[in-house]
Amino acid sequence: MQTYRRISFTLAIFVVSTVWGQQGAPPKPAGAAQPLTAAMAVIQKELNAVGKLNFVVHINIADEKGDAQYSEQLSNVVADPATCTIHYHWWRMMHGEVVNDEDVTRNLHTMLGVWMMSDQQYFKKVIEKEGSTPDDKGYYEKFEPTMYMVVMRVAEDDEESFSFTDEKQAGRVGKAMTQAVQLCGGKLGTY
């Protein structure tokens, strides 16, 4: 009889622990950050959906004016939450000549900042960082069509950006990138 009680007691503990274990963690409160896997899935999906971008940059430096014609494309984007990395192929052409054709890997845990801005905002920040203003010497730069950028600081004086023609798409990638960098232990410094 005592053996029967021990078996019944052990079985009851097993059933209770199994049912309790299946309940899982309580749901996250509304507004909590996306888990890393979900953020990386957004980054991968959205960057692969951009396709080939064709744009012109109108430049005015002092008395010289000109247009630079660009084509660029990200492809084979893989955002890996296990290693906190984003792998992709970056291709860029300027005036009909290929200037970039390379595989790139970015580690999110070493990022020093992530920002989403228009091409004009980015241009203004770059000029100010160099100690000038866009009006110095008549310097002017304008993208056609307007581009939106997710800018990542990959080193103290080195930045990289992903370009978009759709502001909402850039916003989704910027938000997901910010979350992923935070979850991977990177920094979100000021520009």
Image (cartoon, rainbow, N blue to C red):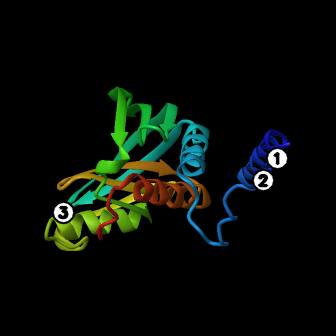
Identify whether 7 is placed above or below 126: above
- Mark in the foreground, 3 or 2: 2
What secondary structure is marked by label 2?
Answer: helix
Q: Which mark is residue 5?
A: 1
Nearest the viewer among 68 and 155 is: 155
Amino acid type of the residue that numbered disc 2 sits on in the rendered structure: Val
Identify whether 143 is placed above or below 94: below
From mark 1 to mark 3, how far is it between C-alphas? 93 Å
Evaluate if marks 3 and 2 touch, with contact meaning CB atoms under 8 Å apart. Answer: no
Q: Which mark is residue 184?
A: none
Evaluate if marks 2 and 1 touch, with contact meaning CB atoms under 8 Å apart. Answer: no
Determine the residue positioned at 41% across, 38% down. Answer: 83
Determine the residue positioned at 24% across, 74% down. Answer: 135
Classify 10 Å Cα crowding around label 1: few (below 14), some (14-19), many (20 and above). few
- Dot 2 or dot 1: first in sequence order is 1
Amino acid type of the residue that numbered disc 3 sits on in the rendered structure: Ala
Residue 155 screen position, x and y as percent: 21, 51
Quadrant location, the C terminus: bottom left
Amino acid type of the residue that numbered disc 1 sits on in the rendered structure: Arg
Determine the residue positioned at 59% across, 68% down. Answer: 32
Q: Which residue is mark 3?
A: 62
Q: Which residue is mark 2?
A: 16
Nearest the viewer among 43 and 179 is: 179
Residue 129 screen position, x and y as percent: 19, 67
From mark 3 to mark 2, how far is it between C-alphas? 78 Å
Classify 10 Å Cα crowding around label 2: few (below 14), some (14-19), many (20 and above). few
